[in-house]
Amino acid sequence: MKRLFPLLLISLVILFSSVISANAESEFEMYLSDFYQKQEKASKLLKEIETDLKDGTRDKVCARQREAANYGIEATESLIKAFKTNGSEAEMENLQAGLDKWRELRDYC
């Protein structure tokens, strides 16, 4: 179950990122860039954790999970700001749900 949760979060982030339009203003682009950078860091950490768990290593799993979740929270907050800057309120409920999932992952350990 623990292995499926990070994969679910990664899927949600990828889903949210595919919704964003290519035409953007500078503030929107700044938030979007921040989202992509932090989302990538979170995804990388979660993949490393998953690999370690498959190999039977539990070294600093909780600390790295919290770090990944913090990146995910920051990424999602940037994405929310990007959507607000762009005037889109359509995905706010889904983004908030994603933010709640990141917080749950952070607080799980």
Image (cartoon, rainbow, N blue to C red):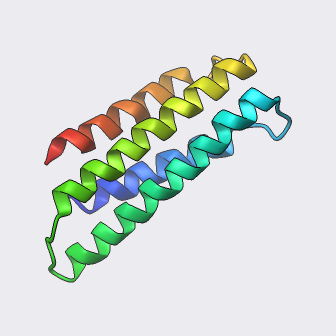
Q: Which residue occupies the extreme bottom position in the image?
A: 55
Looking at the picture, how far across and down is residue 4, in whole percent? 30, 59
Residue 9 spot, x, y in % from top left: 40, 49
Viewer-proximal residue among 66 and 99: 66
Where is 27 relative to 53, above or below? above
Question: Relative to 83, is 41 on the left or the right?
Answer: left
Residue 62 position, x and y percent, is: 17, 56
Please give left or right for residue 91 compared with residue 99 in the image: right
Image position of 30 with respect to 61: above or below: above
Kindly identify the residue that appears in the image at 39 percent across and 52 percent down: 8
Q: Residue at x 25, y 37 (%)?
A: 104
User: Residue at coordinates 70% horizontally, 20% vertically from top-left?
Assistant: 85
Quadrant of the snapshot with the N terminus: bottom left
**Is 50 displayed left or right of 39 in the figure?**
left
Left or right for 66, reference 15? left
Establish if 62 lies above or below 58: above
Q: Which residue is depicted at the point 57% across and 51% down?
A: 37
- Quadrant assignment, res 57: bottom left
The quadrant where residue 78 appears: top right
Dividing the picture into quarters, in which one does residue 59 lie? bottom left
Q: Would you place residue 86 above or below residue 106 in this image?
A: above
